[in-house]
Image (cartoon, rainbow, N blue to C red):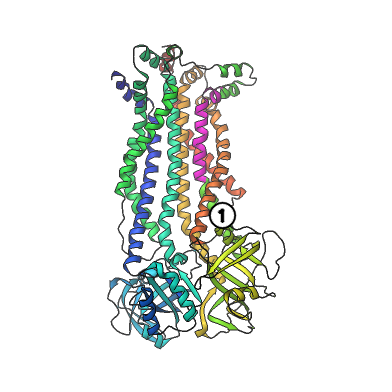
Amino acid sequence: MVIHRKIRRSVKANISFYLVSAVLTAITVAMIIGACATADTLEQEAGGMLDTYQVEQAEFKMDGMLSEEQIRAFEKEYDLLLEEQVSCDVRVKIGAGTVLRILGENEKVNLVDILEGEDISADDDILISRRFAEGHGIQIGDVMELFGQVFTVSGYVARPDYLYCLQDITDPFGNYDTFGLVIMKKEVMKRLTATVSSYGVIYRDPAREKEFRKALYETAEPDEYMTDTQNPRLSLPRSEPEMLRSEFVSYALILFLLVIVLLSFMLSRMVQRESKTIGTLLALGYRKGELIRHYAMYGLIPGAFGSVLGILISIPFSRGFSWYFMQNLEQIPYEVAYPVWIAVICLFVPALLYLAASVLVLNGKIRMDVVPLLKGGGKSHRVSRILRHQKGSFQKTYAVRVLLGNLSRSITFLIGMAVACMIILLGGTCQDSQHNLLNNKISQVTDASYETGLKAFHTGTVTDGETLIDVNFGVTGKTKGFNLVGYDEDNVLLERKTLSGRPEEYGKYYMTSAAAGYYGIEAGDTFTFYHQISMEETTVEITDIIDNDIMLLLMTSKENAAEIVGVTPDSYNNILSLEKPDVPENEILLVRDLGGYRDKYESLLSTTAVVYKILLFAGILICILIVNLLSSMVIEENSRNISMLKVLGYRSREIRRIVLLPNHILVPVSYLLSIPFTLLLTNAMMADTIENSGVLIETVVRPQTLILYFLIVVAAYLVSLLFAGWKLQKVNMVESLKEERE
């Protein structure tokens, strides 16, 4: 059609819109592909390793040992693989607080992946995790002294149950500088030192799991049973990919909606400006559908160019993003799994989405009433009526005219700036929330300095600490279990401050705020849970919620806990103390330095800070683009008035202040609008955190953060005004007046 010949001219006239829309589309496409590529890479490499190297599906500990005959009988009866796993922790003089976990070499469950070097062949050979070794300059062939004996490093290794290498399962993040793995022969370990034994299980027939757990309980009475979904070393590599996809797709949808808003405004503006042309074409016999198809073509342009640009950007973005998230795992070889099918979808979907939005907008804008169109589209004179009664200076009156004369543009500016402000503010809100957890919540867990877990239940009294019953339980329908903690009435080290402010009543049941948030429990609700091994269910009433956002705990008296667990009330398997208790080494399961919690979370914050800086940069970029685009439109629409002001002797700075004054008003309004939406988005992100890590992060934003980020928004806005000022100076007085006359 002849009408299509004007597309190039129209695109040139609205080049700012197409550039901004294409860039936003490109950012969105690159974000989607990069997130999917990273998720696919994690699933391919981490998931592949978990499957290839026979990772455990469950782990249990017990007081005593299973005989080889018992192991073979269980394997045959319940169609599973069962293997003893031995371990011990050794502090080494490589750095402050550096710990090596020595693990015995397995044959059936949790097999090792030798990344470089050779497997163990002699009693004095060991394997070491690569990230720890390379971080401390340990080479293959080097010697290390362990247990008073010299060993030779024969190779670098990764083990599937320590792919997410946490020293303790309560750690929020792995620290590869202070924690590493060493693999040696089991019999050598048992000969040289006291070890902790556990058993790894792989179910060939998952339907037999409950039968096995009940039989195990009746036969061996294990102390603890933990499934792979309850073990963050195994659950985090599996859950992180889906978390990445969901979060970044959410961000992408917000940006897509922003582009659609811009597109709708641009098309409405174009139809309004070209109403006489549209009326003429309709009078000449063009059908409405033909005109809609023509103008809808403008929606394809930013979608097509933005998609292509986004796909090109996504290649290096996918590599960098995958590298960043793979740093959370043990160092294993990986190839970026670039999602070609996602790229193909992203090549077409934005253009089709914009096309569909364009058709919907145009269907309502292009009417068959020719006469109003020929008169200029039936412009409303409500602004003139408002200004007729408006009192004040010329600048104030003109600002109202600009603000209300094109209400859709003002609304578009509000939405665009609010989205930019939301992205800028999101990083600050997340950081404030995490710092609140670090500074105000961690200290509320306990006043103790050390937590000592024992291999088995003991009875009697302890002089240098307070004893607890501490046993893990499961909840139907939830992947994470919790710990039932029984305490004595005179316990002072375990914090039990209720959210209601009511004093704690000994003998009642209290749930931590982290557990209440995860399980959806409120004070007064009943709570049903099951023993991890016997599968027996217990139902209790929750009296109140304890202010503890770090741990999933159900707290009650020792008498109640003892009845549920099936031990005597004077039993204990956990000690809280200010100093390390005097307990024989061979009875200790673990010693947790509670003072180290803060350091671990600070490490987590330093890692996530990179993501928030990216969000800040993206928000600033979007802010500049949006302001530049809409300011350009204001200047274009007011080119005649700008020319007249120049003729009257107004300087460029004065004209800029007069024409762009409404934007100054809309910026703080946009920022205020963005705050509640930012808080809602932060709440959603924190909900993912508790699902993945069991840590409840309360959404908090400090007043100084709001002020600081508002200043950042203002700075970005002022930068964008420099570009607007440059465009304002380029307005040609003669051409503008000539166009108006025509």
Q: Position of residue 409 (x, y in %)?
A: 49, 28
- Identify residue type, mark 1: Ser
Q: Position of residue 85 (x, y in %)?
A: 40, 78
SS type, badge 1: helix
Q: Identify the residue under disc 1.
A: 433
Instruction: Note whether residue 621 is visible.
Output: no
Instruction: Note whether residue 512 is visible.
Output: yes
Q: How many marks?
A: 1
Magenta part of the chain: 401-424
Q: Foreground: 488 or 378?
A: 488
Magenta span contains residue 317:
no
Q: Quadrant of the C terminus?
A: top left
Q: Foreground: 607 or 267?
A: 267
Residue depicted at 53% across the width and 50% down the height: 682
Residue depicted at 39% across the width and 67% down the height: 206
Residue depicted at 44% across the width and 11% down the height: 371
Q: Quadrant of residue 516?
A: bottom right
Magenta span contains residue 415:
yes
Q: Position of residue 461 (x, y in %)?
A: 64, 84
Please give left or right for residue 701 compared with residue 291 in the image: right
Q: With respect to residue 292, does 602 lie above or below?
A: below
Q: Quadrant of residue 150?
A: bottom left
Q: With respect to residue 397, does 238 lie above or below?
A: below
Q: Position of residue 61 (x, y in %)?
A: 47, 77
Please give left or right for residue 476 compared with residue 575 in the image: left
Q: Quadrant of the N terminus?
A: top left
